[in-house]
Image (tube, rainbow, N blue to C red):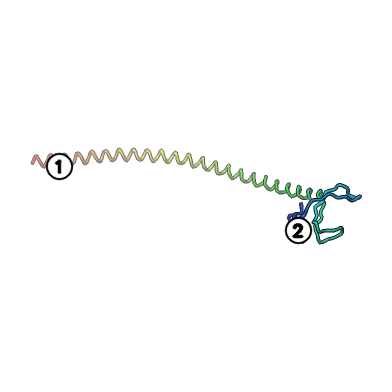
C-alpha cells in the first residue's frame, strides 16, 4: 500500500504480494478487491481492501499531486520568463559593449598609426641630420 495505507496495496504485512480478486459472496457479488493469498475471512493480519476504495484513494492522491505539479509548473514558468528577460538584457548589454570595444580598437589603431608615423618621421629626421652634419 502507498503512504499511510492509501491506494492500491502491493505487499501484505506478511511480505507476500497482494493480488486482485473478484468477490463471489452474496453481499458483494463481482466486486473487485485486493488481498493476500494467505488471508482468510476476518483475518486482520493479512491485507484486504476493496478495489473501488483503493482507486478512489489513488485518484485523490493523484489530484493532489497534479495540483502540486501545476503550482510548480507556474513557478517554473515564471523563473524561465525571468531568465529569458535577463538573457535578453545581457544580450543587449553585450552588443553595446562590443560596439564600445570596436570603437576603442579603431581609436587605438589610429593612435598606433599616428605614433608609427611620428617614429618614422623622427628616424628620417635623425638620419637626415646625421648625414647632413
The residues bearing labels 2 and 1 have C-alpha atoms spaced at a distance of: 104 Å
The quarter of the rendered structure image containing the C terminus is top left
Q: Which tag is nearer the camera, tag 2 or tag 1?
A: 2
Give the camera-side residue of 42 and 82: 42
Residue 25 is left or right of residue 47, and the answer is right
Tell me the residue that label 2 is attached to.
16
Q: Residue furthest left?
A: 133
Furthest-front residue in this view: 37
Around disc 1, counting alpha carbons within 10 Å, would you say few (fewer than 14), some (14 to 19), or many (20 or more)? few
Comes first in the chain, label 2 or label 1? 2
In screen coordinates, is 133 left or right of 103? left
Residue 100, percent from left and from top: 40, 40
Q: Are marks 2 and 1 in contact (CB under 8 Å)?
A: no
Q: Which residue is mark 1?
A: 126
Query: Residue drawn at (80%, 55%), measured in percent from left and top?
Result: 35
* Mark 1 residue element: helix
Q: Residues within 10 Å of mark 2 (few under 14, many from 20)?
A: some
Q: Residue visible at 84% across and 60% down?
A: 43
Residue under the point 17% across and 41% down = 123
Instruction: Judge from the rendering whether residue 81 lies leftward or rightward of residue 133; answer left or right.
Output: right
Q: Residue 17 location, x and y as percent? A: 75, 56
Provide the secondary structure element on which disc 2 rests. Answer: loop
Which numbered tag is attached to residue 53? none
Q: Return the residue nearer the eye: 75 or 114.
A: 75
Count of numbered tags:
2
Horizontal and vertical percent position of residue 11: 75, 57
Quadrant location, the N terminus: bottom right
Q: Position of residue 104 (x, y in %)?
A: 36, 40
Which residue is found at the position 31% from the left and 39% from the top?
109
Quadrant housing residue 42: bottom right
Amino acid at each position: 500500500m502507498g503512504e499511510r495505507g492509501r491506494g492500491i496495496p502491493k505487499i501484505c504485512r506478511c511480505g507476500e504480494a497482494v493480488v486482485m480478486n473478484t468477490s463471489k459472496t452474496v453481499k458483494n457479488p463481482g466486486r473487485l478487491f485486493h488481498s493476500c493469498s494467505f488471508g482468510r475471512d476476518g483475518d486482520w493480519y493479512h491485507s484486504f481492501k476493496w478495489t473501488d476504495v483503493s482507486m478512489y484513494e489513488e485518484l485523490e492522491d493523484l489530484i493532489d499531486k497534479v495540483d502540486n505539479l501545476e503550482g510548480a509548473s507556474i513557478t517554473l514558468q515564471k523563473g524561465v520568463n525571468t531568465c529569458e528577460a535577463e538573457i535578453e538584457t545581457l544580450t543587449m548589454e553585450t552588443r553595446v559593449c562590443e560596439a564600445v570595444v570596436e570603437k576603442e580598437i579603431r581609436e587605438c589603431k589610429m593612435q598606433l598609426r599616428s605614433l608609427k608615423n611620428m617614429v618614422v618621421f623622427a628616424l628620417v629626421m635623425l638620419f637626415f641630420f646625421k648625414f647632413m652634419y
